[in-house]
Image: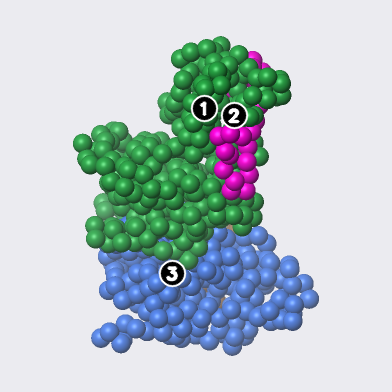
Amino acid sequence: MGEKVLMKGTEAIGEAAIRANCQCFFGYPITPQTELAAYLAKQMPKLNRVFVQAESEVAAINMIYGAAGTGARVMTSSSSPGISLMSEGISYIAGAELPCLIINIVRGGPGLGSIQPAQSDYFQATKGGGHGDYNMPVYAPSSIQEMVDLIQDAFDVADLYRTPCMMMGDGMLGQMMEPVEFVLRTPRAVPEKDWAATGLHGRAKHNVINSLYLDPQDMENHNIHLQEKFRRIRENEARYELFECDRDNDLMIVAYGTTARICKNVIRDAERDGIRLGLVRPITLWPFPTEAFEQTIDRTHFGYLTVEMSAGQMVEDVRLAVNGRQPVAFYGRMGGMVPHPKDILERVKQMIYQGVK
Amino acid sequence: MAQVTFREDICKGCGLCIDVCPKHIIQFSERLNTKGYHSATVPDGDMEKCIACTFCAMMCPDVAIEVVP
Amino acid sequence: MPITFTKPRGLTDAPTHYCPGCTHGIVHRLVAEVLEELGVLDKAIGVAPVGCSVLAFEYFACDVFEAAHGRAPAVATGVKRAKPDSVVFTYQGDGDLAAIGTAEIVHAATRGEKITTVFVNNAIYGMTGGQMAPTTLPGQVTETSPYGRDTNIAGFPIRVSEMISTLDGAAYVERVSVDSVKNVLKAKMAIKRAFECQIEGIGFSLVEVLSICPTNWGLSPQESMDWLRDHMLPYYPLGVKKDKTKESE
């Protein structure tokens, strides 16, 4: 076991990526994740690995496309407006089936928005973002330790399925400091990258990294192949945490990331008022852990309350998972405002005592 | 004797080879190739005038021409 | 009997989709010949653009990436940084390189990326059907400059080679043409020099190749060659614009 060190979230991501054998980082400065680039700018050259500050997020994601296409383990990092710029490239990466990790430290929007924590890019991360029928695994840790632990898993999943993966934190997770321990994890067995464009080096057939299929039948076949892959990811890679769910509760809260941590405090506070709450915490936002709702659907009296730092995005997936079997309500703050436990508890009481949906 | 060979079904009949042949021996074929173009050709009897300069091949956008000295 | 001229190993057997007389085919062949002659076909990695040469990945017999529109220099940067021993080139048209991809080409050049860019300038968008390009000449009629390019409205063409040559990271920049046998030979020498510049690790290299687009110019291939000579050469003078390879000798 390693020792615990006090680290800022963004720097911990950098260290975890290095330990997960990330070979190349390409990025563009944007608040609130710039310290990650600064950390890697310092560390990567010492390890004879690649750090390049690109001229834009657009260039950065295309450098990722190039480096990932050679078979290297690669990562980029940005925040909301930058992820919008990268979305074209992410679509190409998904289409060409290249493994990579994209860190997204979400800030308030829309537009230039704010630089405070937000979760308003859930739709962008889980419902495409870029064009075309694609999804990518999206991890939403709720502590720096969990973020660190998930980095290698996300890299492995990227390699295993030949897919981009996103690590989605909010500005709070990126900026705060917590003690973390870098535990050496056994990597998952991932297949040889015989598809990579490395130069022929005696190989008879040339490898092409591409997402263009001019014949519509070929394009549909490629889509069928991608959808089959997405089905396998949905079946095997969904992750969640159930907190205080092994009992009959008055209400189940659904929250992820920083919001989930706040909601754990709410659950504790509610006990003092004689209210029993459970927490369903999706760790993967895509694939969405619908299984978590099968396990809790019969153990909540008043249904589910989804709490987000958004106008209500994940709540749509909660409603799909619950599928009308229980009421699903929502509470959210927007634009970089973080919900206060007192206000969440107030919303819980509205549901329970006043029947407010 | 030099020999210039046209891959008839690759040729798109652009005529760039015809323009640069210093011996003016290349012309369009009477018949259409599978693409529907009159491909370039050297008529029987004119091949002996070929000097294997490869000008035609160098200007051919479709790499349809092979030249042997 | 020795063969004087045959298809280079750097090209696949796939017939190209280019229009009759389109000089992309000549430029493809020159790149392939150079890769073969330099003995680097085995470690060459190409990056194809969006535009007429979007299918170049089917024609080059080396490993190839198909990039998003304009992003080839960024993709090539990623490739070269991850695989520094490979020989990396982008193949781009004027819309791809000089309009949507201007930022990427400028910054790849100024970073001195050890890559080679083959830039085909035919003063028009070919694939989308003949719209005004950033290199369309003043007065030139296209689908989107139907009264001729009015510089008051549409501004001026970019002389890419001259612009790139101002950047310290650019090591070798030359403009060539493929309108004649003599110029084709010169173009090949330039492309070879550009690749050598990369292999020797001197810096970024770019060869701009003036080309024709008979279909969208509305001219025969022969008339197009004349048009290139009469109109493009005066605006886009041929020659070496930058050569750090000499300085380093």
* Distance in Å between CA atoms under marks 1 and 2: 8 Å
Chain B hue? brown
Q: Looking at the rendering, in which quadrant would you find the N terminus of chain C?
A: bottom left
Give yes or no for contact between labels 2 and 3 (Cβ–Cβ under 8 Å): no
Chain for mark 2? A
Q: Nearer the viewer, residue A216 or A148?
A: A148
Residue at the image position 59 percent from the left and 48 percent from the top: A336
Q: Amino acid at mark 2?
A: Leu
Q: Is A305 placed left or right of C238 in the picture?
A: right
Chain for mark 3? C
Crowd around label 1: few <14 · some 14–19 · many ≥20 (10 Å): some
Q: Amino acid at mark 3?
A: Ala
Magenta part of the chain: A321-343
Chain C hue? blue
Q: Between tags 1 and 3, which lies in front? A: 1
Q: Between tags 2 and 3, which lies in front? A: 2
Q: Which residue is mark 2?
A: A345
Most extreme residue toward the right is: C147
**Residue A327 part of the magenta-drawn span:** yes
